[in-house]
Amino acid sequence: MKAIYGVAPLFSLLLFSCNAEPTLQKYFVENTENKNFIALDLSPEILNIDPSKLTVAQNDALKSFDKMNVLAFKLTDKNKAEFETERAKVDLILKDKKYQQLMKFSSGKEGASICFVGTDEHIDEFVFYANKKENGFAVVRVLGKDMNPTAVMTMMSVLQQSKIDLEQLKPLQQLMK
């Protein structure tokens, strides 16, 4: 009987410690199989870069990048209501204080924002969010280890040298049509 009294507080602590708050990770998992979404997971290999041709700083920036998750909602005449609902969900998630906004652009019909999770010098995740009322929206999560703004800028120079494997991006071409 004493064992039950010891297990009950532990079980209730477990229940209350579970976070029911929506997160981008949960959102991605919930919508990966939804027919209105296009989901892609991209690794650094998509860049097709020869590391021997990079500077030390560029190699370090590349090593801090783990993967990129893309979730895009393709708007059609049949799913306009769901588009508004899903866009509102993403907006709500990104209002959480853990997503620190770096930049935001809006023109009424379209908008974009860049957020990050972590501290200025130890960023775990960058989030790029863009939406256009005629096409849909896309959320891109760039996940890594100890990324920082300097490494991100360096990574931009690496992208310029890359020979991106466009075959992996074919599903996104549907969204642009």
Image (cartoon, grey):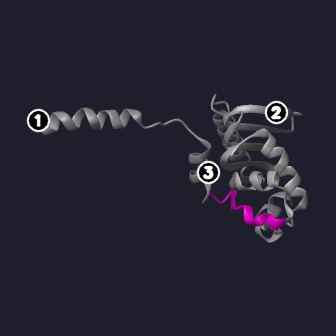
- The residue beneath circle 3 is 28
- The residue beneath circle 2 is 103
Against 56, residue 133 (above or below) is above
Amino acid bearing label 2: Met
- CA distance separating discs 2 and 3: 22 Å
Residue most extreme to the front? 56
Residue at x 79%, y 61% (from the top left corner): 172
- N-terminal of the pair, mark 2 or mark 1, is 1
Amino acid bearing label 1: Lys
Verify CB contact (< 8 Å) between mark 2 and mark 3. no
Q: Is residue 176 left or right of residue 12?
A: right
Residue 130: tell me if it is visible: no
Q: Nearer the viewer, mark 3 or mark 1?
A: 1
Q: Nearer the viewer, mark 2 or mark 3?
A: 2
Amino acid bearing label 3: Phe
Residue most extreme to the bottom? 167
How many other residues sit within 10 Å of disc 3, few (<14), some (14-19) or many (≥20)? Answer: some
